[in-house]
Image: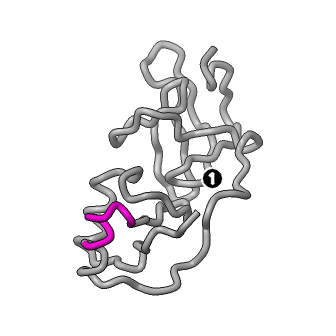
Amino acid sequence: MSYFKKAKNGEKVFGLVFGRGKITKVFDESHYKILVTFQNGYEVPYTDEGIPGWGNFKKQTLFYRDDVDLKKADFSPVEKVLSVKKIIKHRENENLEVRLPSGMWVKYTKADNSYTETLLEDEKYHLFRKASKK
């Protein structure tokens, strides 16, 4: 059974990338089952398994808000802004984290490549940090 098989308009959801949102459209005869509008204005189509229609995602990134436990998610502020040299060094060592628009810190390799490249081009170095030890 698909996760969003019984999705309805207006249901509250949480995307790992964009954060809180609502289901605004449900499609019955389409590859994408739902359209979600997030608080920042983005509209993203999702399959009935919660896989978005953008990026190179192969796993579910959208959940019903009541099903998400964000207690273990890291939303802490950045403590030290890294230089470009340090960002490159940590990326090569696979020891770099990036902050998603939802505010969550994730490993650099889990974030969409075009998103991270845009951050680097726009010199938004405060959205990168050395991976925390867990």
Q: Amino acid at mark 1?
A: Arg
Dot 1 falls on a residue whose secondary structure is strand
User: In which image quadrant can residue 83 be found?
Assistant: bottom left
In which quadrant of the rendered image does the N terminus lie? Answer: top right
For label 1, the residue is 20
Image spot of residue 106 (x, y percent): 48, 58
Residue name at image x 30 percent, y 74 percent: 87
Q: In the visual, does 72 lie left or right of 24?
A: right
Image spot of residue 76 (x, y percent): 61, 73
User: In which image quadrant can residue 129 be found?
Assistant: bottom left
Nearest the eye: 73 or 45: 73
Nearest the eye: 61 or 131: 131
Nearest the eye: 81 or 93: 93
Count numbered badges in the picture: 1
Q: Is residue 92 magenta?
A: yes
Magenta stretch, residue numbers: 89-95
